[in-house]
Image: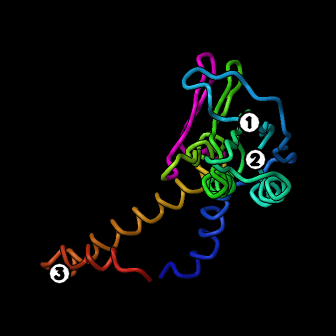
Amino acid sequence: MLSHLLPRLAAPLVAAFALVAPAEAMTFTRIETVELAGDGMRPTQMILGSGPIQLGDAQVFDAFMANLPPTDHFEGTQWGIALNSPGGSLQEGVRLGERFRAHVVTTMVLNGQACESACAVAYLGGAAAYAVAEATERLLQPGARLGFHGIAVSEAAVAAANDTLDLARTTGAVIRDYAIRMGVRDVGLVQSLFNTPP
C-alpha cells in the first residue's frame, strides 16, 4: 500500500545519518618530547596530531609512521601522540585509533588542548610497549579537555526522520484498527507482521 513512498522516505533517513568530513585534514608533526608526570620514561618520542579528522587521515598517519623508527621497548623508543582536534569523521576516528594501537603509540591530550568527538574516539586506541607485552596507554594532563558525545544530526535531517517515523506509526495504527474492525482476534499476529522486514 505504501511501497511507492518508501524510496522517497529512505533518502532523508540516509542523509540523516551520513557523516560529512571537514574541509581540512589532521596534520601530523614530530615535536619535542613533552615532560610528563609518572615514571618519566614514556613516551620518548612525540608527534602532534592537530586539526579536524577527515577520511584518509589514518592512511596519512601510516605513511607518517613509515618514516620513523618503530616503538621498541628494548631500544627505549616509545611514540606518543598529543591530540588537539575538534573531531570530524567518526569512521576515520575509529580507523585512527586502530592505527595508534597497531603502531603502539600512546595517546595523550596536553594541558590547554582539546580532543573532542571523533578525536576522543581515536584517543581510545592509545598503547605502549613493555618488556613482555603491549598494553593500553592513554594520558590526560590536568587542564586538558577530552569530549565524548552522541552522534550529531542536523535539525532538518531529524525532522525528516521524525516525519518518516510518524508516518510509519500512523500507518501501523490504521492497519491494526482495520484488522480489529475486520474481526482479527489475534492482534499480536498483526503486530508481529509489522516487525517483519519488507
Tell me the residue that label 2 is attached to. Answer: 53
Quadrant in which residue 115 is drawn:
top right
Give the residues in magenta: 133-154
Q: Which residue is nearer to you in this view: 103 or 180? A: 103
Q: Tell me if residue 22 is in the magenta stretch.
A: no
Label at residue 85: 1
In the rendered structure, which amino acid carries the disc numbered 1? Ser
Please tell me whether residue 138 is drawn above or below residue 103 in the rendered image: above
Q: Residue at x 72, y 46 (%)?
A: 88
Between label 3 and label 2, give the one nearer the viewer. 2
- Name the residue furthest left: 185
Residue 108 is situated, as x and y percent measured from the top left of the image, at: 64, 33
Mark earlier in primary sequence (1, 2): 2
The crowd level at tag 3 (other Cα within 10 Å; few <14, some 14-19, many 20+) is: some
Please tell me whether residue 91 is drawn above or below residue 31 in the rendered image: below
The crowd level at tag 1 (other Cα within 10 Å; few <14, some 14-19, many 20+) is: many
Mark earlier in primary sequence (3, 1): 1
